[in-house]
Image (cartoon, helix red, strand yellow):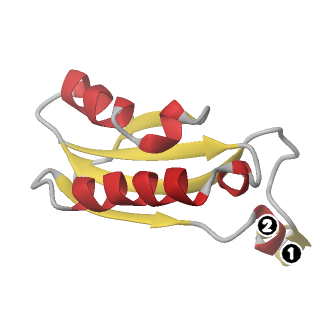
Amino acid sequence: MQYALLIYTEPGYHEVLSEAEREAAYAEYFALADDTRYSAGARLQPVETATTVRVVDGRTLTTDGPFADTKEVLGGLCLIEAADLEEALDLAARLPAVRLGAAVEVRPLVPR
């Protein structure tokens, strides 16, 4: 089954890391990318670059910024293939962002 690992962080959390800590975290993400269960992943631009789109009464409305004002923002995602939820949770716990204070939402994808 496919799962999305949605990584929620405080804005700028990685900026407080030393260069060595940042390089170590990147190395862990690159190692995860070599795992056969890994499908895709991406780090998102800062939340300030977001634009939210809604359609209300047939009119398209856009708003600068994210949908909700929260302390943590969606900072990136990974798509993985796992046998079950337990395996997906294990992979999520290995993400460097988790050790650095992020929350990871693990959500199964709807099969095609």
Q: Identify whether 100 is placed above or below 73.
A: above
- Residue 16 x/y as whole percent: 72, 50
Residue 52: which disc?
none
User: Which residue is at a point 66% across and 43% down the rendered structure image?
Assistant: 9
> Considering the image in quadrants, where does the C terminus appear?
bottom left
User: Which residue is at a point 25% across and 53% down the rendered structure image?
Assistant: 32
Residue under label 2? 54
Report the front residue among 102 and 39: 102
| Lateral position of residue 103 relative to residue 96, left or right | right
Q: Amino acid at mark 1?
A: Thr
At mark 2, the secondary structure is strand
Report the front residue among 43 and 12: 12
The numbered mark, 1 or 2, whose residue comes first in the sequence reads 2
Q: Quarter-wise, where is residue 44 in the image?
A: bottom right
| Lateral position of residue 43 relative to residue 35, left or right | right
Residue under label 1? 62
**Dot 1 alpha-carbon crowd within 10 angstroms: few under 14, some 14 to 19, many 20 or more:** few
Please name which of the two marks, 1 or 2, marks the residue nearer to the observer: 1
User: Which residue is at a point 73% across and 66% down the rendered structure image?
Assistant: 46
At mark 1, the secondary structure is strand
- Residue 79 x/y as whole percent: 32, 54
| Lateral position of residue 106 relative to residue 18, left or right | left
Q: Quarter-wise, where is residue 88 in the image?
A: top left
- Residue 38 x/y as whole percent: 21, 55
> Considering the image in quadrants, where does the N terminus appear?
top left
| Lateral position of residue 47 relative to residue 108, left or right | right
